[in-house]
Image: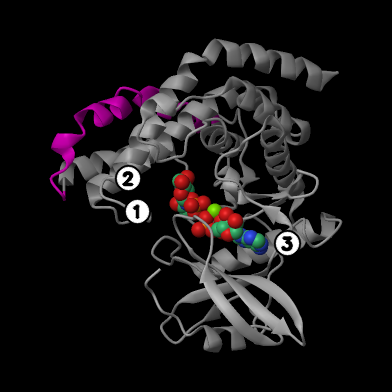
Amino acid sequence: MSKKFDFQAIVKQFCLYGDLVSVAPYGNGHINDTFEMVFDQAGARMRYILQRINTNVFRDPVNLMENIRRVTSHLAAKSENSRQTLTLVPAVDGKSYVIDAEGNCFRTYLFIENAKSYDILETEKQAYEAARAFGRFQADLSDIPGGRLAETIKDFHNTPVRVQQLENAIKLDKCNRVKDVAAEIDFVLSRKPMTEKLVKLQADGVIPERITHNDTKLNNVMIDDATGSGICVIDLDTVMPGLAHYDFGDMVRTGTSPAPEDEVDLSKICMRFNMFEALLRGYCSEAGRVLNDVELENLPFAGALITLEIGTRFLTDYLEGDVYFKTHREGHNLDRCRSQFQLVRSIESQHDEMMKLLNNVKKELKK
Ligand code: ADP
Ligand code: GN1
Ligand code: MG
């Protein structure tokens, strides 16, 4: 990370005791800058997470932080301990964030110790537990008081809008890259009808708006080192009104393939059915009590849709010159796009088995 921040000045503005010993970049996120901070507090070592909010992506950090303050305090009231939800460290002026001299917006969380987030899930138990944590998160937020949460990014999961953004990028062809991606563009445009399905069901009042996480990448849940339980959902910037499918779909995208999101060997990418089953069962064990029949029936479809949507966003960013997602090599966004589309193919090819499983799970829920 090349950016230099005046960390000593920043941490002084948070209610943090003791001496800052070290600050180092942390995690694999594509959007914010995350740091691990170590403090010496009268001889005891304490870690904190410091994050700089990417304000090119999140244009209104004040309302975003108000969402997070409301969500974390609502969840804290339902939690058994401080490892089960993110805990904001307040600023000395009482706000939940600090703006530094350059206008960067920072927040600090207690560090959740003895737990990890996984980029690739290794076991069915991890998949079940992570999905259960996201299901519980959604169910727990169904009674948050204080009115509708702010939309931190408008149309974040509006798939037809994402396709429209791709079409705009194709028209502009800013970097003269359209000529190299005809097959990928065709992949999206030939699937246009499916991108409209959920927004239509919502507009018809068949599936309801809920408070959703919207970025349920499986590395956004902390798994307890000792018990293997999914203990805490993190990365709350996109918590806002949405559809249950956005959350379940992104879990399928990130939790079922044995290969990373940017894998270039497409033969390694597939939806492992056993992991899909673990995600479905884990998610429904908590969210099943609030979802209606049409929502449940569309869960298998959500995996293909959201994988197509995120692949489309990677493709758009490639055409626009890699301006949104952090990239670490030439063609990185295109590699990500291709791997996502391969995963879409794999999910689509398992449609019938997924529906069979879903019908069994539905029957079990009704018992
Ligand atoms: P991004 O939006 O960039 O993905 P995250 O909020 O997901 O940022 O944080 C990046 C990584 O930092 C996470 O995957 C997780 O491993 C770690 N992390 C975030 N918050 C905490 C926390 N409170 N305690 C421990 N680790 C954390
Ligand atoms: C971004 O912040 P991170 O890395 O968890 C992105 C998600 C994408 C994901 C793809 C705010 O998530 O929407 O699905 O990358 N977050 C935002 O890996 O755009
Ligand atoms: Mg994250």
Closest to the observer: 136 or 6?
Answer: 6
Instruction: Determine which of the numbered discs, if any, sits on residue 327 in the image.
Output: 1
Kindly state the secondary structure of the residue where label 2 is placed. helix
Quarter of the image for the N terminus: give it.
bottom left
In the image, what residue occupies the spot 43% across and 67% down? 55
| Crowding at mark 1 (Cα within 10 Å: few <14, some 14-19, many 20+) | few
Q: How many labels, in total?
A: 3
Q: Earlier in the sequence, mark 2 or mark 3?
A: 3
**Residue 154 in sight here:** no
**Residue 208 is inside the magenta segment:** no
| Side (left or right) of 270 relative to 43 | left
Q: Earlier in the sequence, mark 1 or mark 3?
A: 3
Kindly state the secondary structure of the residue where label 1 is placed. loop
Disc 3 under 8 Å from ligand 1? The reply is yes
Residue 88 image position (x, y, % from top left): 68, 70
Q: Which residue is mark 3?
A: 113
Kindly state the secondary structure of the residue where label 3 is placed. loop
Quarter of the image for the C terminus: give it.
top right
* 2 relative to 191, above or below: below
* 348 relative to 143, above or below: above
Splitting the image into 4 quarters, where does residue 37 fall? bottom right
Q: Which residues are magenta?
A: 174-201
- Amino acid type of the residue tagged 3 in the rendering: Glu
